[in-house]
Image: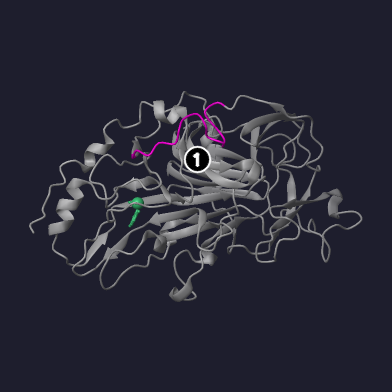
């Protein structure tokens, strides 16, 4: 095992977390670092600089207002000029490489990248919609990496990042502290928050939803009641931890080393070389914070009589738009559950949807597809494209004996967005784009006997 992985695993052992979604959390890595009773005392404790990070306009209603106060060794303003750097395979909206494609598309997993590829270099954009300069829309990325972001840090001004590991665990070192995300967990890095990723395994892979729109929140529960779906207390925010010096330093007074800070801004990467790590926040409080969530804690609800409910019942997080019920993007999980519907076609039904659906698979299989939809791969069923069970699944489910059935052989998810997803040129040219996806719906025979 490489010493990088060993170090990351050691740091990821027994992490402490703060529990709850959207809370006013607070944390200090050094006792007394957090000011009491005010945000900006004349002199912040311990010689720290006070700084606000605003994730919403100052004046947004309380229910949507997001900001955190950070108490740091250097103010974020102390940085040199950013210059454009190569975007590589990490692309931003507007996605105009290709005309948006109405066809059903499916990809296999990303190939293993060259040795020395870190999370940032390993990001590969499949497509998206909207415009980060308008703070609306989303992008779908995959990542494959095998190296730590050793001396570099990333932040995304364009949106928040929902990271969905599929293979291998990640240690996320953020301005707010450390998070661990293994396959089956998701991690969220809010807009503008600086972080580094260190793999906990030799080769890591997964998905990222970049949400340019309003921050993800828990969906309303309506008649479901006060509990269910993703429970707020299962979201975990980090406790304060800081680097004093270069990236990876944790001790007081270590020599400051240069750190490359990469910022994604309106679709492009910009880089500046700092003379210290910007992960130097000793204490913080607020509600604009990163978090992790274990998808296995999702409380799956469904039909206990008949029919297959719409998958909105599986929404973990939603990014609302100005139209009630119409999400910029929903994050939906298909977690282990019982199917008991009587006289019901139990797998996902055939349908055409005004919303666009990107699906990925974290492990196992998905109950609408017998084969070809594999962990690390993904499918895109764009606005109004006809999709549903493949032929094998249709035949099987149409004649299955309807005893109670546990679906527990996989963990799939969906990024469902209000606008069509335009794929990037690299996604349409990729070797791992499956050429004959349409065939899964071939041979669905005519059974009509009037
Ligand atoms: O597999 C899909 O296409 C996603 C999906 C799942 C489901 O249970 C119902 C509708 C739907 O679009
Ligand atoms: Fe669908």
Residue 310: percent from the left, percent from the top? 36, 61
**Along the line of sight, the residue nearer the viewer: 304 or 176:** 304
The image quarter containing residue 306 is: bottom left
Q: How many marks?
A: 1
Residue 315 lies, in percent from the top left, at: 44, 60
- In magenta stretch: residue 103: yes
The image shows residue 109 at horizontal and vertical percentages of: 37, 35
The magenta region covers: 88-104
Instruction: Tell me the residue at 51%/56% (across/down).
Output: 327
Q: Residue at x 61, y 32 (%)?
A: 150
Q: Quadrant of the C terminus?
A: bottom left
> Left or right of 83: which side holds 11?
left
Q: Is residue 132 above or below residue 35?
A: above
Comparing 237 with 137, the one in front is: 137
The answer to whether residue 12 is magenta is no
10 Å crowding of disc 1: few (<14), some (14-19), many (20+)? many
Residue pushed farthest right? Answer: 42
Q: Is residue 205 visible?
A: yes
In the figure, 318 relative to 379: above or below?
A: below
Left or right: residue 322 compared with residue 370: right
Residue at image location 17% in from the left, 67% down from the top: 403
Q: In this view of the protein, which residue sits in the foreground, 196 or 376?
A: 376
Q: Is mark 1 within 8 Å of ligand 2?
A: no
What kind of secondary structure does the magenta stretch mostly adopt? loop
Q: Report the front residue among 251 and 292.
A: 292
Q: Position of residue 434 (x, y in %)?
A: 31, 32
Question: What element does badge 1 sit on?
Answer: strand
Task: Please say whether residue 140 is visible from this viewpoint.
Answer: no
The residue most toward the front is 450
The residue that label 1 is drawn on is: 128
Q: Quadrant of residue 307?
A: bottom left
């Amino acid at each position: 095992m490489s010493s990088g992985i060993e170090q990351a695993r050691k740091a990821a052992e027994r992490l402490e977390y703060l529990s709850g979604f959207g809370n006013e959390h607070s944390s200090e890595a050094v006792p007394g670092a957090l000011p009491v009773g005010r945000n900006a005392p004349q002199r912040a404790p311990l010689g720290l600089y006070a700084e606000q990070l605003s994730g919403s306009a100052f004046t947004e209603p309380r229910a949507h207002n997001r900001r955190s106060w950070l108490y740091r060794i250097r103010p974020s303003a102390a940085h040199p000029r950013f210059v454009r750097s190569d975007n590589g395979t990490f692309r931003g909206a507007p996605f105009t490489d290709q005309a948006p494609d109405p066809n059903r598309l499916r990809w296999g997993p990303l190939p293993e990248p060259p040795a020395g590829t870190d999370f940032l270099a390993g990001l590969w954009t499949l497509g998206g919609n909207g415009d980060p300069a308008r703070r609306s829309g989303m992008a779908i990325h995959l990542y494959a990496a095998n190296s730590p972001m050793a001396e570099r840090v990333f932040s995304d001004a364009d949106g928040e990042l929902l990271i969905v590991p599929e293979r291998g665990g990640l240690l996320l070192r953020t301005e707010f502290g450390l998070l661990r995300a293994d396959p089956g967990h998701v991690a969220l890095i809010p807009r503008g928050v600086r972080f580094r990723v260190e793999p906990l395994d030799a080769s890591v892979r997964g998905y990222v939803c970049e949400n340019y729109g309003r921050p993800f929140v828990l969906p309303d529960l309506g008649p479901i009641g006060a509990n269910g779906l993703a429970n707020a207390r299962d979201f975990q925010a980090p406790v304060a931890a800081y680097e004093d010096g270069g990236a990876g330093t944790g001790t007081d007074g270590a020599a400051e080393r240069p750190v490359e800070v990469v910022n994604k801004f309106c679709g492009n990467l910009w880089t500046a070389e700092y003379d210290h790590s910007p992960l130097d926040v000793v204490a913080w409080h607020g509600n604009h914070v990163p978090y992790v969530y274990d998808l296995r804690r999702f409380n799956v609800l469904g039909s206990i009589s008949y029919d297959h409910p719409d998958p909105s019942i599986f929404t973990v997080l939603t990014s609302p738009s100005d139209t009630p019920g119409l999400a910029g993007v929903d994050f939906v999980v298909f977690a282990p559950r019982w199917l008991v519907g009587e006289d019901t076609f139990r797998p996902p039904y055939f349908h055409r949807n005004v919303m666009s659906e990107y699906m990925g698979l974290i492990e196992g299989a998905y109950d609408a597809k017998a084969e070809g939809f594999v962990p690390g791969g993904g499918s895109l069923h764009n606005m109004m494209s006809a999709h549903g069970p493949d032929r094998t699944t249709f035949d099987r489910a149409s004649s299955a004996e309807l005893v109670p059935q546990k679906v527990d052989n996989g963990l799939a998810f969906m990024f469902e967005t209000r606008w069509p997803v335009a794929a990037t040129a690299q996604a349409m040219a990729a070797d791992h784009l499956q050429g004959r996806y349409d065939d899964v719906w071939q041979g669905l025979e005519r059974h009509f006997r009037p």
